[in-house]
Image: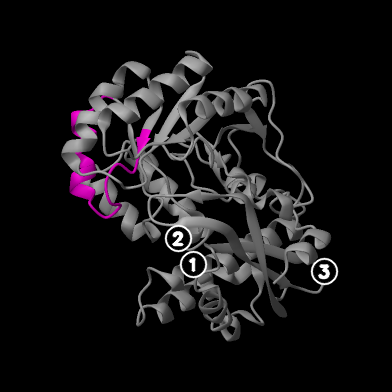
Amino acid sequence: MIINKLKIKAVKIPLEKPIPSGKMMIRSADALLVTLQTKDHIGEGMVFTLNGTRLSLLRDMILSLESLLIGTDVGMSGAFLKQAWSELVFLGQRGIGAIALSAIDMAIWDLRGKEANKNVSQLLGACRASMPMYRSGGLRLSASIDELQKEAQDLVHQGFKSIKMSLGSKKIEVDVARVKAVRAAIGPDIQLMTDCNQQFNVSHAIQLGRQLEEYRLAWIEEPVVFHHHDGEAEIARALDTPIASGENEFTSLGMIEMINRKSADILMPDLQRMGGPTELMKVADLAMAHNIPIAPHLFTQMSLSLAAAMPNAIYVEYMPWFAPLYKEQLMLDQNGEVPVPTTPGWGFQFEPKAIKKYSY
């Protein structure tokens, strides 16, 4: 099965309400939808930026790999990946090169599944038929305590058994009060994660973490700037609550550094920053060898099938931004888990009407 065409479509998905994050005001999620064509099948992948920042630069980077890709037999895609990673050395294997390569590798895995008439999870050897899924993207710093409690209860009523909220106040007592309020609203049986969005220093994070112990958090995510792995390790040693991190690191090289420094109790590799599914599965194996759980970051429609084949995967993340792009929708079961699809490829396909609606 020979790849004979690469196509890229840019889409912009405005958010219903702008989100103030730790670093910017997020107004839209802008994606490049990448399709690879063979004689019989189409494979799909996707990468994105926030607010469209440097999206055209990312598109050019993907196109720079086209000459290596066209004519590749999907069954020999490892040769393409080997050559692409080699050529990226000069400009750096972390950063935009890895992101560009990830979009292509996603589409290759979709093609591989469709050629074999199997879901990607089945190609890899799934070890579960459903995955716990936590709801992300809500419970923001801009919400009042009353708004937090109502939103948290609404998410639980939708069937989520695990939800994540943002922290980041300069005053420890403010964050503690917000966590206390959400825990009171959802009760003791719902898993509650917190995301600090890299807002704290080590001392602040440890003080906050100790005061949050009584609320039985599933994890505290990115308490300090993502590359401060020694600081993360110090926080992880000081707290009983697990520290989760890794979404901003690139490739297995970044993950190895985190593993060696014991920076996180839970690793959160991001599919596009890893360089694609092939590299992400290597990271899962590395983490498994060190007895570290994995919770893949974003890209639920693809991460789901990959996580199903990871014995050490504990969650997939659901951010609703990209749901409108797909024909198929993620559905929770009564246990707050999402069934792993069994249809060929990723089991999720782009919806042409949605692409037209959101197209640049």
Looking at the image, do the residues carrying marks 2 and 3 touch, with CB atoms under 8 Å apart? no
User: Would you call the spot at circle 1 few (<14 residues within 10 Å), some (14-19), or many (20 or more)?
Assistant: many
Q: Which residue is mark 2?
A: 273
The residue under the point 32% across, 57% down is 254
Looking at the image, do the residues carrying marks 1 and 2 touch, with CB atoms under 8 Å apart? yes
Q: Which residue is mark 3?
A: 40
Q: Secondary structure at mark 2?
A: helix
Note whether residue 129 is visible: no
Q: In the picture, residue 273 is in which quadrant?
A: bottom left
User: Would you call the spot at circle 2 few (<14 residues within 10 Å), some (14-19), or many (20 or more)?
Assistant: many
Q: Which residue is mark 1?
A: 99
244 or 121: nearer the viewer: 244
Q: Secondary structure at mark 3?
A: loop
Query: For the magenta stretch, what is the residue range?
Result: 220-240
Q: List x then y, in percent, for residue 75.
A: 64, 67
The residue under the point 46% across, 26% down is 145
Q: CA distance from mark 1 to mark 3?
A: 27 Å
